[in-house]
Image (cartoon, grey):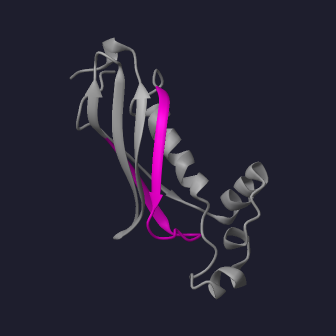
């Protein structure tokens, strides 16, 4: 597979209670904003907030399976959270290739997580890829 500027990949997902419990156990993150509905509401939210790490797991899926794909290796990710994602909301993460350095074998991407018209998160990625799989 050849990677080009403008290539895009998307994935829809819903964070459910099972995913939240799995991530809580794996990460050992017991932050009340993710686990205690009454506490989250007292802070002005509509309920507990989905773990950002779950969104990053979906980004990992796109990077490892779509762009750059199974031969890529991540160098860096950067994420900014804009609005909370709540349990049961349908979200979509979209990744787009925005820059390529064939000489260095580096593919740069930008991504966004949307829940309907609400921008939940955005960020950037850098991956290395074998030169024969890059088209400038």
When the figure is inspected, residue 45 is found, relative to residue 115, above or below; the finding is below
When the figure is inspected, residue 120 is found, relative to residue 39, above or below; the finding is above
The image position of residue 43, as x and y in percent, is 62, 83
Q: Count of labels shown? A: 0
Asked if residue 58 lies left or right of residue 136, the reply is: right
Q: For residue 92, which quarter of the picture?
A: bottom left
Q: Residue at x 62, y 60 (%)?
A: 51
Asked if residue 45 lies left or right of residue 27, the reply is: left
Magenta-highlighted stretch: main secondary structure?
strand
Q: Residue at x 73, y 54 (%)?
A: 22
Residues rendered magenta in the picture: 73-96
Q: Residue at x 74, y 51 (%)?
A: 27
Q: Quadrant of the N terminus?
A: top left
User: Does the magenta run of residues contain 92?
Assistant: yes
Q: Quadrant of the C terminus?
A: top left
The image position of residue 93, as x and y in percent, is 42, 53
Q: For residue 131, which quarter of the picture?
A: top left
When the figure is inspected, residue 57 is found, relative to residue 75, above or below; the finding is below
Asked if residue 4 lies left or right of residue 83, the reply is: left
When the figure is inspected, residue 34 is found, relative to residue 7, above or below; the finding is below
The image position of residue 49, as x and y in percent, is 60, 70
The image position of residue 84, as x and y in percent, is 51, 70
Seen from the viewer's position, the closer of residues 123 and 9 is 123
């Amino acid at each position: 597979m050849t990677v080009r500027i403008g290539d895009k990949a998307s994935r829809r997902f819903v964070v459910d209670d099972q995913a939240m419990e799995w991530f809580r156990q794996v990460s050992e993150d017991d932050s009340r904003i993710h686990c205690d509905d009454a506490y989250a509401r007292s802070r002005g939210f509509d309920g507990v907030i989905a773990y950002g790490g779950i969104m990053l797991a979906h980004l990992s899926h796109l990077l490892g399976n779509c762009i750059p794909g199974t031969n890529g290796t991540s160098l860096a990710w950067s994420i900014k959270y804009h609005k909370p994602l709540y349990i049961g909301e349908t979200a979509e993460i979209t990744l787009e290739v925005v820059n390529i350095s064939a000489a260095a074998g580096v593919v740069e991407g930008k991504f966004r997580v949307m829940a309907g018209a609400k921008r939940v998160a955005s960020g950037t990625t850098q991956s290395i890829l074998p030169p024969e799989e890059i088209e400038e």
